[in-house]
C-alpha cells in the first residue's frame, strides 16, 4: 500500500503542480482532436506546434522535480552507474567506491560535478584552472565566447578550494599551480556565471552531481588520513 504523505512534504506540491500542468496541456490539445481522440488532418500542424510548447514546459518541470528529489534523497553506495565522460565516452563505476574508475570519470568529463558536490558539502568555493593558449585566437575566442572576462575555451579543470588554499579534486589535495596535468596554470574563482556556462555548454558534460556526492565522504576521509600522517 502506498505511504501517505504529510501535507508539508514537498512531493505533495509536486503532484498537485503536475496534475495542474497536465490538465492544462490536455485542454490546449483537445480542440485539435476528433471525438475519438485522434488529431484531425486540418489541425495536425497546429497540434504539433502546441505539443512542442507543452513538451518544453514538461522538460523544465521534470528538471525541477529531479532537483528537488536530489535535495531530499541521496543515492546509496554500491550502485552501478554509467556517466558521460569526454569526447563522447562513458564510464561505469560504483557509487561511493573511490577507485581507478571513479578517478577516471571525475578527472575526464566530470571534474565539475565532483567540485560542485564537494563545495555543496563543505561550503568551500570552487575554482577553474585556465589555459592561455587559445586566448589570442579570433576563432576560439570571439567576443561571444567570453564569460566573466575569460574565453570559454580556456576553462579546463574545476576544483574546490580548501580554506588553506589547497586545490582539491578527485585525486586529492594539491598546491595551487601544482594540480597534476595542469602544473603552472592559473586558477580563477568559479563564479555563478561561469558555473551556469559550464552547466549548459556543449563542450562540458552534464554534471552528474548526484553520483559525485557519494564520493565526497571517501575523498574527505583520504584527506584527513593524509593530514594525520603528516
Image: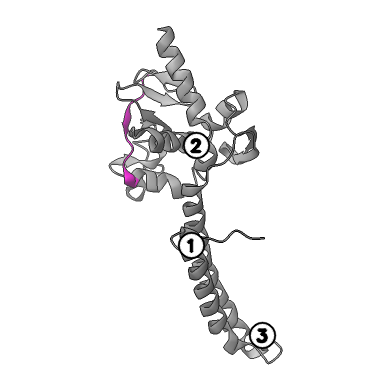
Report which residue position mark 3 lands on. Answer: 39
Which picture quadrant has residue 36?
bottom right
Is residue 34 inside the magenta stretch? no
Between discs 2 and 1, the one toward the N terminus: 1
Q: Residue 137 location, x and y as percent?
A: 37, 38
Return the residue nearer the eye: 70 or 83. 70
Please give the range of residues in magenta: 184-193
The x and y percentages for residue 166 are: 35, 21
- Quarter of the picture containing the N terminus is bottom right
According to the picture, the residue beneath numbered tag 2 turns out to be: 213
**Closer to the camera: disc 3 or disc 2?**
2
Marks 3 and 2, the one that precedes in the sequence = 3
Q: Residue at x 30, y 21 (%)?
A: 164
CA gap, disc 2 to disc 1? 23 Å
Secondary structure, mark 2, is helix
Location of residue 218 with respect to 67 vertically, above or below: above
| Residue with the mark numbered 1 | 60
Q: Nearer the viewer, mark 3 or mark 1?
A: 1
**Who comes first in sequence, dot 3 or dot 1?**
3
Q: Which of the numbered marks, if any, corresponds to residue 115?
A: none
- As drawn, the residue found furthest toward the bottom would be 35
> Does the rendering let one see residue 143?
yes
Amino acid at each position: 500500500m502506498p505511504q501517505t504523505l504529510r501535507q508539508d512534504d514537498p512531493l505533495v506540491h509536486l503532484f498537485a503542480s503536475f496534475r495542474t500542468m497536465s490538465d492544462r496541456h490536455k485542454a490546449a490539445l483537445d480542440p485539435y482532436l476528433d471525438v475519438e481522440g485522434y488529431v484531425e488532418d486540418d489541425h495536425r500542424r497546429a497540434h504539433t506546434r502546441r505539443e512542442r510548447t507543452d513538451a518544453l514546459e514538461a522538460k523544465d518541470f521534470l528538471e525541477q522535480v529531479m532537483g528537488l528529489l536530489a535535495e531530499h534523497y541521496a543515492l546509496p553506495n554500491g550502485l552501478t552507474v554509467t556517466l558521460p565522460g569526454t569526447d563522447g565516452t562513458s564510464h561505469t563505476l560504483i557509487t561511493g567506491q573511490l577507485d581507478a574508475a571513479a578517478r577516471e570519470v571525475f578527472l575526464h568529463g566530470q571534474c565539475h560535478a565532483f567540485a560542485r558536490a564537494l563545495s555543496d558539502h563543505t561550503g568551500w568555493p570552487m575554482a577553474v584552472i585556465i589555459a592561455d593558449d587559445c586566448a589570442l585566437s579570433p576563432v576560439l575566442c570571439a567576443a561571444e565566447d567570453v564569460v566573466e572576462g575569460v574565453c570559454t575555451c580556456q576553462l579546463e579543470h574545476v576544483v574546490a578550494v580548501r580554506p588553506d588554499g589547497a586545490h582539491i579534486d578527485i585525486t586529492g589535495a594539491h598546491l595551487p599551480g601544482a594540480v597534476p596535468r595542469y602544473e603552472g596554470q592559473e586558477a580563477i574563482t568559479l563564479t555563478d556565471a561561469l558555473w551556469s556556462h559550464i552547466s549548459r555548454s556543449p563542450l562540458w558534460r552534464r554534471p552528474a552531481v548526484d553520483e559525485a556526492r557519494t564520493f565526497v565522504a571517501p575523498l574527505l576521509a583520504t584527506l584527513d588520513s593524509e593530514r594525520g600522517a603528516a
